[in-house]
Image: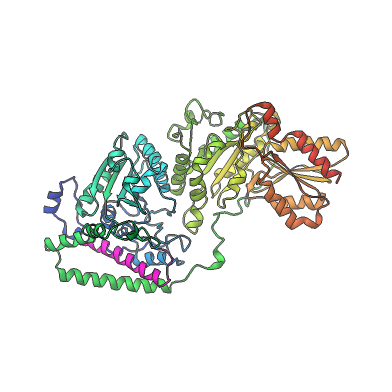
Amino acid sequence: MQKKKRTTSPPKAKKPARKVTRATSRAKIDSELALWAYKSMTMARIIDDKTITLYKQNKCHFQISCAGHEGIQVAAAHVFRPGHDWFYPYYRDMALMVALGMSAEDLLMNAMNKLNDPGSHGRMMPMHYASIPLRVPPQSSPTGSQFLQAVGCALGAKMKGLDEVVYVSAGEGTCSQGDFHEALNWASREKLPVVFVIENNNYAISVHISEQLAGKSIAKIMANYENLATQEVDGSDLFASIEAMQAAHERARRGEGPSLVEAHVPRLQSHSISDNHLKYRTKEDLAQEAKRCPIKRTRDLLVAHKISSEKEIDALNGLLKKLVDEASDAAELSPDPDPATALEHTFKNPEPWKGIEETPATGEEVFIVDALNHALDEELARNPEMCIFGEDVAHGKGGVFTVTAGLTAKYGAARVFNSQLAESSIVGAAIGLATRGMKPVAEIQFGDYVWTGANQIRNELAMLHYRSAGDFACPAVLRIPVGGYIRGGAYHSQNIEATFAHFPGVHVVYPSNATDAKGLLKAAIRADDPVLFLEHKGLYRQVYAKGPEGDANHLVPLGKAKTVRHGSDITVVTWGALVHKSMLAANQLEAQGFSVEVIDIRSIVPLDIEHIFSSVRKTGRVLVAHEDVLFGGFGGEIVAQIAETCFTHLDAPVKRVGMKYAAAVPHSPVLEDVVLPQDSDITNALLELARF
């Protein structure tokens, strides 16, 4: 993507170097800055109005207004450095994008879902911004999800010792979200260079701030976070806003930590084109709000200080409108996305096995826990952009299962460190780090607790590459211990592969032995796409799961199944802990004269379905065995594909074995044995198939 020229050029005049009072700034007003700011605000407002017209003409299908918010946004664009600092805006930040340099044509292509829209190339709703040259990662719709990603991006800047500041914004309603508080906690604790801009217009759609927050001032509510500077500003006052943003930006650059700037702004339009604010606001209220309009106030300032006359401003407005109309015409004539590309960019590399040749592993046999530790050690040494974090992973603890033992001592606390106890934070920060080009390997301590991070996984991690049409990648790795058979009870025994396999955009890997665990983890770390790396904690130290780990160059390709036992009568398709159980059952069947083939799929996504089909065509009988709940389990997908493609090769109905339909794995050993699939369950299912 080529860097776009600014629609309105920023001033070259020297910016104020010190914080001054509003009276002083007004007395020494920078004429060029004031005129540039007015142009930027007005351009954004005219584009905003144009999108409403386009909506009425059925040329765009959504609109959300920036009207009333322009002052603080243009102030931020003046202070921050496009192409150097990073920006995580929200859907009202059109004026920020204009002032940073995004063209009117780009913004109108965004509104009309055109191919050349730099935000998503037609894949996202309008007013979701992105730009490679401006360093604006692609936005998404779940409100507040950007906070933690901005923290991750700022964490990366600090880790690399870079002079970068991260801007992240939202409305006051989003301050009710847990991700907001998690982000403030992490940023404050680590003194990260991030500025939180809260554009407070008093309404989250129709919900007034009095029904939203336990206080009228967000800055006051958040003031007790140590290392966080908070301030309130009239977001319609251009120079007061610039002073506030300069103070926050300079503080971050000095390494003193994050700031929260609460900008009080009017919302001059309904929440979106789908909303009608007259249903919950009075005309008198709206009339009063109009008096706070930042464009009107900046225009009055220009006239009062004799920077421009009313006539000159009217002429400027006419010129800007003409430019927007021309940009709209050009945007409308630009190409729509090609329907043939609708399925592209779910993965950066949809065939991650290519280029990796799996060779037999040699060397000493190790437990899975040691194989994983060695894989992380080797990849940390290989890739200086890699870091590891999660709950309890650092220092002497080395993770609750000791997978990361010794790595902090060897590589330092800057690369192997503890996170806060918050799964959404862990995933969100990993996304921010990965989006800026680093390689985070984050641990979710137990799969049972991943659900508070599910929004960040499903709506952010899995979708980022697709929603940017390939402009941005997010190759984070999440290590997640899963599974039962450890007497762990209801919240330490879950399997999660079926849920996350349903979310296109993430690879899901699930090894059953040490050799595969090491090779797959190393391949996952080197992959171009996000990977959920599931580790069965019940296998960590099982002797039967040991295997030679291979050398530092040994990789196991993602998306390739492995036949671990050859046979001719029945195929067992399985993964994780049930691979060993299936092998035991196959031995039982062999004693009765039946030859059983066992396939370890190793990767849930991508699924090596052709490997499975080949075996099914040979044996004609199939059992799919997995530890997760049978109903709705991933095995059902495998069965469906077998039935669809290999129906004429089947000599018996496809059978399944899985966890019973219980809400959780109980703690009592006698109850756990009933709920989870046992060796006998697989043996009995195989006998039924053999005798059909």
* Depth check, front residue: 587 or 551: 587
* Depth check, front residue: 553 or 132: 132
- Looking at the image, residue 309 sits to the left or right of residue 215; the answer is left
- The spot of residue 67 in percent (x, y) is 30, 60
Residue 254 can be seen, yes or no: no
Residue displayed at 28% across by 45% down: 261
Image quadrant holding the N terminus, namely bottom left
- Looking at the image, residue 117 sits to the left or right of residue 449; the answer is left
The magenta stretch spans residue 33: no
Residue displayed at 67% across by 48% down: 560
Query: As drawn, which residue projects farthest toward the right?
Result: 593
Tell me how many marks there are.
0
- Looking at the image, residue 640 sits to the left or right of residue 214; the answer is right
Residue 594 lies in quadrant: top right
The magenta stretch spans residue 49: yes
Q: Which residues are magenta?
A: 35-62
- The spot of residue 326 in percent (x, y) is 34, 74
- The spot of residue 301 in percent (x, y) is 15, 59
Rendered position, 38 above or below 180: below
Residue 258 can be seen, yes or no: yes
- Looking at the image, residue 266 sits to the left or right of residue 30; the answer is right
Rendered position, 609 above or below 42: above
Q: Main secondary structure of the magenta part?
A: helix
- The spot of residue 111 in percent (x, y) is 40, 65
What colour scheme has been applied to the protein in the rendered image? rainbow
